[in-house]
Image: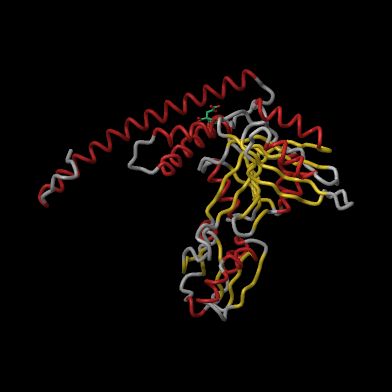
Amino acid sequence: MTDNKTPILPGNEEAELKKLRIEIDRLDTEMVALISQRAECAMRVAAVKLQADPGSAVFYRPEREAQVLSQVMERNPGPLGNEDMARLFREIMSACLALEKPLEVAYLGPEGTFTQQAAKKHFGQWVITKPMPAIDEVFREVEAGAVQYGVVPIENSTEGVVNHTLDTFMSSNLKICGEVELRIHHHLMAGPNTRLDKITRVYSHQQSLAQCRKWLDAHMPLAERIAVSSNAEAAKRVKGEWSSAAIAGEMASELYDLEIIETKIEDSPDNSTRFLIIGTQNVGLSGGDKTSLVVSMRNEPGALYHLLKSFNDFGIDMTRLESRPSLSGNWTYVFFIDFVGHISDPTVIEAMEVLKKTAVDVKVLGSYPKGVL
Ligand SMILES: O=C(O)C(=O)C[C@]1(C(=O)O)C=C[C@@H](O)C=C1
């Protein structure tokens, strides 16, 4: 082995590479054996779960996955970055879970959307993804038991909250089982041989067109901007139109065989979207959890003050407060609240008791691990 201070003479390069590759082969052999042992362990875990609950064993455990990924990041000595290392383990766990039981997940489609990308980021490449045409259909698919989980967008850093998702929670009994955040990078893509100066039309979702407005003004001021139902739909349309381009994510370019002409054309470099994982499961404590609630208050002075006070008095960190019309009419509102902690934490139990005395209704949407990746 050479340290990085020893210069390698040109003639020695071959010999040095050979030695290093022997070392890499040795390490790979060890890793293959270790990963196989890990997969066998996961199969034994599945047998234990099945024995305990033969009819309805739950194989996917979000709290355990969050712990595994957090530990990997804590123990990572480098030189690989924490997130890179965690992503490798994300895929190992995904393959292990597929051995236990293949997981099926519905998402807001069509194929190639950022929601599909979020599903793969959260569950890994082994998950089977099923596109649905609308947010409420993702909910329905999970409620009907056709898939175990669903993935829906909840908020974007520049566009704000996805009201449709919030509203659907009011009439659903599904639980939030997890969250995942995705950096949104928009790329300009077109069919092979399409030049930027020949493009007369740009298709994309209306939000993406808005998020790339400055770039489009500067580089393609004359191209017509056409809003369609999703970025993936935009990519699909462009396939047969030689003077058109689409703004979409990388997955869409791969799926529809388009070439990326310009990468990362979004105006705000921190543009990201948060997605929720919905299911029927109550998720256990991971140690780094969040809880989401919907609270209906009486329409009277001081209602919001009492709501906030119940959290403040117990030192609970509220991370989001959103008000929405209650859908029952009469100008009444409900509050969507996120806070740090798990519904089984003793302090949270006490705070909920106090809150229930002033609120008309408190509905727990779920406690779940904070997004690790
Ligand atoms: O610990 C478990 O319950 C497992 O099933 C093992 C394992 C893993 O590979 O680490 C796999 C799937 C679960 O979602 C969580 C963790």
Q: Give the x, y percent position of residue 285.
A: 60, 28
Asked which colour scheme the image uses, the reply is secondary structure
Residue 227, percent from left and from top: 66, 69
Identity of the residue drawn at 51% across and 64% down: 187
Q: Position of residue 373 (x, y in %)?
A: 50, 43
Total marks drawn? 0
193 to the left or right of 131: left
- The image quarter containing residue 233 is bottom right
Q: Nearer the viewer, residue 223 or 28?
A: 223
Report the quarter where the N terminus lies.
top left
Residue placed most toward the observer, 357 or 249: 357
User: Which residue is painted at 73% across and 31% down in the image?
Assistant: 352
Tell me which corner region of the image, top left, top right, bottom left or bottom right, holds residue 316: top right
34 over 88 or under it: above or below = above
Residue 109 vertical placement versus 38 (above, below): below
Q: Nearer the viewer, residue 363 or 106?
A: 363
27 relative position to 63: left or right: left
Q: Is residue 372 above or below residue 157?
A: above
| Residue 45 placement (x, y as % from top left) | 54, 23
